[in-house]
Amino acid sequence: MKKFKKAMALSLALAMGLSLVACGGDTAETTEATEAEATEAEATTEAADDTEAEEDTEAAEEDTEAAEEASADDAAVDLSSDGKVLNIQCWNDEFARRLRDHYPDFVPNDPEDATAGGKIGDIEVTFTVTPSDENAYQNNLDAVLPENADAAEDAKVDLFLVEADYALKYVNTELAMPVEDLCITEDELANQYQYPKDIVTDANGNLKGVSWQGCPGVLIYNRAAATEVLGSDDPATVQEAVKDWDTFNATAATLKDAGYKITATANDTFRVFSDNVSSPWVVDGKITIDENIKKWVDMSKEQVDNGYTGTADLWSDDWSAGFYPDGKVFCYFGPAWLIDFCMAADDEASIAHAGGWGATTGPQGFSWGGTWICAANGTDNPALVADIMRKLTTDTDIMTGIVKDDNDFVNNKPAMEAMAADTSYGDAVLGGQNALAMFCEGADKIDKSNICEYDQGCTESFQAAMKDYFEGNHASYDEALEAFYQSVTEKYPELTY
């Protein structure tokens, strides 16, 4: 009878644990809880009848073995109820490479092309890549996501990626699932930075996505130029020369005399100012110009007029010319992804390839960009979607691997703090410098309370209008401002100014 009671108690403990796994809970934590509950059940039963100690000991050994076998069998995620194809919508190969390189048991179809997809168990993984140019990626999402619930099973979108500038466009709809519906808990996300959560939290407080990235920004400087003009390429020396915007401007004049532009374009500093505003672009349906945005206009106009910087568009050839020594550009502003993903490190002629950049805090902290993983409403792969989210955004070991292999700043405080203190780590693009401590400091200070769903459209229109002003195509700031208003209200007729 005592054996029977022990077996029933153990079975109940296991059943409780396995129900958590079925909900999508963390397998490792569930296993530990299951074993703990099983042990407690054994102890309770043994205490109930000391006269059958030997019999109970034998039963305990048998039941413990059974519990361990059950736990091992359920360590893998149960994908038996998921669909046969995992469809992912993205705009480049960044997430595809993270999945290929860091998700356990992913078998690529083509090791050289991450977007060629692969297999996770019996499930085929496919990527639909639509570039962001001319808003093509969002236009594609707008076409496929509303019909997703009614799509054929193998054609359903399961995951889609979004950027910060337009995340709320999808987060504040039913197109993205709350992560709570995937049984991902707040406790599981406790090690993440707060601001990446804020960006994908809807108006009702529901978290609608997760990210493996944090994107605090720094000032990335040309070490050779710093040595030539400032006398040293040490980060502390450079920081003293760019510690605030007045000092930054004074250094810009010194750099001009030496034949350097301080930045490739006025747009290089825009994100620093726009990330430190006190109000959003739109308040109660009315377009607003924050005081910090106006400060950027005034500084940039002065710098362009004095020849300290140019007016090229970001991502243009004129902007990226500064990635090479002959470009004569002193600094760029950006996060970790810009340093290692965008500065031509693969080109032997580039400054990055030679480890010729350094990093320092700059005049003001800021963030730029990032990629968020959203579960598409209507997915037929909820278990796999949840597991990808967990492993790539909450597993400290996996995220540490992303830092070491990809030099990405990950959305995991313990991982980043450990790597910031690791004297063996360094970024080759930064000449071996470990800049993670300044990234960590910046990530804790980022405030995204003033984002809104109009950010991308307003930012693009404002920069275009001010470029015309800086180049003399608008006679005054007010004329440029009117052009901005006209452009934005054409995009969003519901807005006023």
Image (cartoon, rainbow, N blue to C red):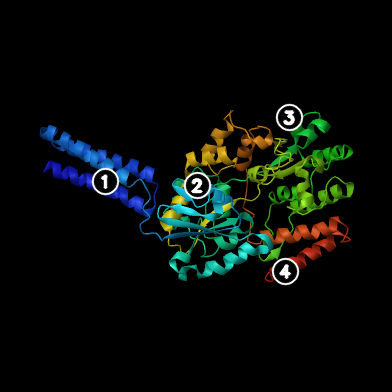
Which percent across, then down, holds residue 82? Answer: 39, 59
For label 3, the residue is 234
| Tally of marks | 4
Residue 496 can be seen in this image: no
Give the alpha-carbon distance from disc 3 to disc 1, as whole Å: 59 Å
Callout 2 amino acid? Leu
Q: Are marks 3 and 1 in contact (CB under 8 Å)?
A: no
Alpha-carbon neighbours of circle 2 within 10 Å: few (<14), some, or many (≥20)? many
Label 2, label 4: how many angstroms apart (C-alpha)?
39 Å
Which residue is disc 1 drawn over? 13
Q: Is residue 493 something that shows in the picture?
A: yes
Left or right, 225 with reference to 18? right
Name the spot of residue 493 as percent of width and height, x first. Answer: 69, 71
Residue 157, label in figure: none
Q: Earlier in the sequence, mark 4 or mark 1?
A: 1
Is the residue marked by circle 4 packed among few (<14), some (14-19), or many (20+) residues within 10 Å?
A: some
Q: Which residue is mark 2?
A: 392
Write down the quadrant of residue 245 in the picture: top right
- Where 57 falls versus 133 (above or below)? above
Which residue occupies 37% across, 47% down?
76
Q: Which residue is mark 4?
A: 489
Residue at 71% of width from left, 51% of height from top? 274
User: Looking at this view, is 35 or 338 the one in front?
Assistant: 338
Q: Give the Cα separation between the discs numbered 4 and 3.
A: 47 Å
Mark 4 falls on what kind of element?
A: helix
Classify residue 219 as left or right of residue 81: right
* Mark toward the start of the polypeptide (1 vs 2): 1
The first of marks 4 and 3 along the sequence is: 3
Task: Choose the circle earlier in sequence order: 3 or 1.
Answer: 1
Q: Residue at x 61, y 63 (%)?
A: 138
